[in-house]
Amino acid sequence: MACTNPAQINESEGQKNKVSQWSVYLIRTVDNRLYCGVTTDVERRFNEHTSTKRGAKFLKGKGPLELAWSECVGDKRLAMQLEYKIKRLPKCTKEQIVTGSVSVLSLVE
């Protein structure tokens, strides 16, 4: 699931400024664990986890990895709040997020 980066027009300068759209994602490891993270580009970040040294330490040696779920949530603050809450959920609830039976936005108070 891709999150687009819409352009916002600055009328005073007539220039286009990119507005970052943040996403929350879950990656499944070979031993069926779920890792949660946030990014502005899910595809790029997943590739960093799988094939570069910029990936999360938690995921090292736990491949092959699978992008289990991602959702565009808007701003960085909301994405980080959701990441914090998702990381504290039991595995069964994270699996419900992956299947779509629980909305991640329902976690926001």
Image: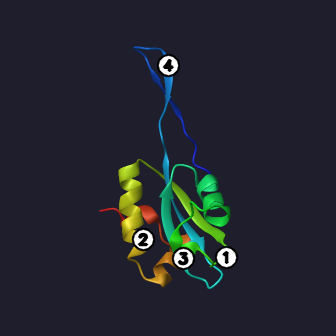
Label 4 and label 2: CA atoms lie apart by 37 Å
| Location of residue 69 by image quarter | bottom right
- Residue at screen point 55% across, 68% down: 26
> Which circle's residue, 1 or 4, is located before the other in the chain?
4
In space, the residues marked 1 and 2 are separated at their CA atoms by 21 Å
Q: Which residue is mark 1?
A: 63
- Pointer 3: what residue? 34
**Labelled disc at residue 87:** none
Q: Amino acid at mark 4?
A: Gln
Tag 2 residue: 86
Q: Amino acid at mark 1?
A: Gly
Q: Secondary structure at mark 1?
A: loop
Neighbor class of circle 2 (other Cα within 10 Å; few <14, some 14-19, many 20+) is many
First in sequence: mark 2 vs mark 3: 3
Marks 4 and 3, how far apart at CA:
41 Å
Residue 43 in the image: above or below residue 83 = above
Dots 4 and 2: beta carbons under 8 Å?
no
Mark 4 highlights which residue?
A: 15
Q: Secondary structure at mark 2?
A: helix
Q: Position of residue 4 (x, y in %)?
A: 58, 43
